[in-house]
Image: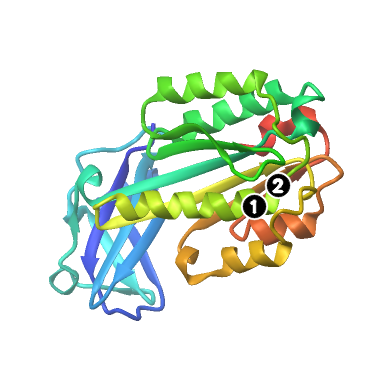
Amino acid sequence: MRAPNPFLRPSRWAAPLLALGLSLPGCGSQLEVTRLNSDQKKPNNVWVFFTVEEKDGEPVGGLAAEDFAIYEDDQLVSTFESKQTIQNPDVAAVMYTLLLLDMSGSITESGSADLVVDAAQGFVDRVGQSQKVAVYAFDGGKDIRSVVHFTEAKGSVEGGLEGLRTYKARDPSTNLHGAIVEGLAVLREELDEDKRPLKFGTMVVFSDGTDRAARVSREEMVEAIDSEEYANFELFAIGVGAEIEEGSLNEIGRDGTELVEDEENVQLAFE
């Protein structure tokens, strides 16, 4: 299990490059520091949300702020200047991930729902260790459906996903554009309600086809994705099957995409 640790330090606001490393004598080469996310606020605060693990993936705890070295433009920053400190992740930071699943007729009527649910379950098991996760489903209807609201309770997620195995699409077409626009708004609203100073939002979209419902135009979707309101969100897209085009997938998943042609490989796409 990865143990997330927000790391807070004052810094010059326009720092072009910031790096974080361990400075434990004899141990640095045996430990891995992985940045999960970061943020900055004027005039001089930088947060880094990270994990420290051994080479075998075992989390490392009990580290103090002085065990880390901060580099700015490849230059070591003095601890007197950085005033670096480690904050309790539950108090200082939170990560929200919204998983948006295509449950249109092409999925539910082809018998692929079980594959999607199994893949989503594996994804939630991994991500839910350090984040609040919500699952929403869409078909050709106007609105997305809440399957599991943002939670850290594993049982709630599992129960909600199981219900998708017998999901009945209200409209068998695919309202992909509209689902993305609404999903972004849901994620934004949830983050705005959280009072912690450091908040990260991620949306992962799964679909096996193009938008057929024509409720929201492609241009409206792209405008929403590119808007300042969602500029700090990380967006990923997973496409399955020959119908969805790689170009469309890239428009949605600006931070990463995965495209597989065989539905049997859906689970691999979520890893």
Q: Is residue 184 above or below residue 132?
A: below
Task: Write down the quadrant of residue 63 in the picture.
Answer: top left
Q: Residue at x 65, y 19 (%)?
A: 165
Q: Is residue 79 left or right of residue 180?
A: left
Label pair 1/2, CB-CB below 8 angstroms: yes
Q: Residue at x 74, y 36 (%)?
A: 171
Secondary structure state at the residue bearing disc 2: loop
**Which one is in front, 79 or 44?**
44
- Residue position marked by numbered label 1 in the rendering: 178
Type of the residue with mark 1: Gly
Image coords of residue 251 (percent x, y): 69, 61
Type of the residue with mark 2: Asn
- Residue position marked by numbered label 2 in the rendering: 175
- Quarter of the image for the N terminus: give it: top left
Image coords of residue 192 (percent x, y): 34, 55
Q: Is residue 58 left or right of residue 212?
A: left
Structural crowding at the residue carrying mark 2, measured as other residues with C-alpha within 10 Å and reported as few (<14), some (14–19) or many (≥20): many
In the displayed image of the protein, which residue is found farthest to the left? Answer: 80
**Which one is in front, 209 or 6?**
209
- Quarter of the image for the C terminus: give it: top right
Structural crowding at the residue carrying mark 1, measured as other residues with C-alpha within 10 Å and reported as few (<14), some (14–19) or many (≥20): many
**Which one is in front, 129 or 245?**
245
Task: Write down the quadrant of residue 73 in the picture.
Answer: bottom left
Q: Residue at x 80, y 33 (%)?
A: 106
**Which one is in front, 19 or 55?**
19
Residue 36 visible in the snapshot: no
Image coords of residue 70 (percent x, y): 29, 65
